[in-house]
Image (spheres, rainbow, N blue to C red):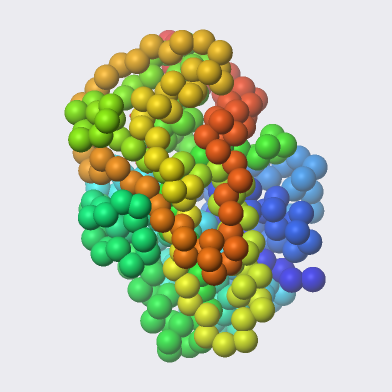
Amino acid sequence: MTTVMVTGGAGYIGSHAVLALRAAGFDVVVYDNLSRGFADALTGEAFRGVPLVQADVGDRKTVQETVRRYGVQAVMHFAALAQVAESVAQPALYFRNNTVQGLELVEALLDSGVNLFIFSSTAAVYGEPAVVPIPEDHPTRPTNPYGMSKLSFEFVLESLARARGLRYVSLRYFNVAGADPQGRAGERHDPETHLIPRVLRAAAGDQPVEIFGTDYPTPDGTCIRDYIHVTDLIDAHLLALRALLTSTEAFTRVYNLGSEKGYSVREIVAAAEKVVGKPLTIRELPRRPGDPAMLVASSARIRQELGWQPRLGLDAILATAWAWEKRRPGAARRTRDAES
Ligand code: UDP
């Protein structure tokens, strides 16, 4: 049985990875400092018996103890800070967490004999796109410290692959949304900045939906993004893990993960109205600084090389996210807060 360490396993995407890894027969150990994740995300039958090591990824001693104690053979590294505005205000925090601590983690793993690594990267490494859909060989010119900290870590991985035989897959996520179709996990950020959960929270609390910018050079004036269901995203991680486990030589890959379809903010709001079954009030606000008009992935590379195929479209994203929103821990409290 292969044991996989999931950093950030108490967070949104990491908790879905834990479920999928267990369903596929892997042993899992979660490694999370709970700074942004929630210990109670790992309660419930589906998570029974999954150990949680509460520590920073930069804590080499604890990383190495965890590898020894659980016999870790591969790592999925989700733990990171991921808010663009916060990264602009506190860049050092982002480089320290996402790049420097990440480096400590990978070195500690290599020193312990673990050389299989899957990294949660981001479309933010591209910055303002020169062409859409965006292929992996598009220039990387991140426009904020969040994207820079993730791109810097990709350089760390590339260099350690050459110098020390690290085998890795870096997955550049576009807009991840939706929840576990069985309702065992879902999105839960505090504060929540992402469009889909914000629209659904607004719907649940009878609050207006805020649209940031209606004067973009797009057909309806609002930003276009590529939304990918978290279940499809995690499928790609499982394919990457299998590729790493069966590779016999140097293996370094960078893949985009997106659906290759773009939806505008207004289209998302219209689709959400259908799912929640009522019209939503819209508040049009100025642009949010740093938002590119349009981000859509080309995921041709991972489709061709690993046979990945996203299956769940926008309706499934919204339906699973809405089912989760209605039962999410803290949902009632937040709704009351929103009303006060
Ligand atoms: N957005 C919006 N209202 C919100 C949250 C987001 O209009 O309440 C817009 C945001 O400006 C961007 C798009 O929705 O154009 C997606 O934003 P999100 O934060 O979900 O993802 P990002 O693409 O920034 O990673």
Q: Position of residue 25 (x, y in %)?
A: 78, 61
Left or right of residue 219: residue 225: right
Report the front residue among 120 and 72. 120
Q: Position of residue 239 (x, y in %)?
A: 62, 64
- Picture quarter with the N terminus: bottom right
The quarter of the displayed image where residue 101 is located: bottom left
Left or right of residue 60: residue 52: right
Q: Residue at x 56, y 35 (%)?
A: 317
- Picture quarter with the C terminus: top left
Q: Position of residue 199 (x, y in %)?
A: 44, 24
Q: Is residue 127 visible?
A: no
Q: Is residue 21 above or below residue 192?
A: below
Q: Residue at x 39, y 40 (%)?
A: 262
Count of labels in the image:
0
Report the front residue among 219 and 57. 219
Report the front residue among 293 and 61. 293
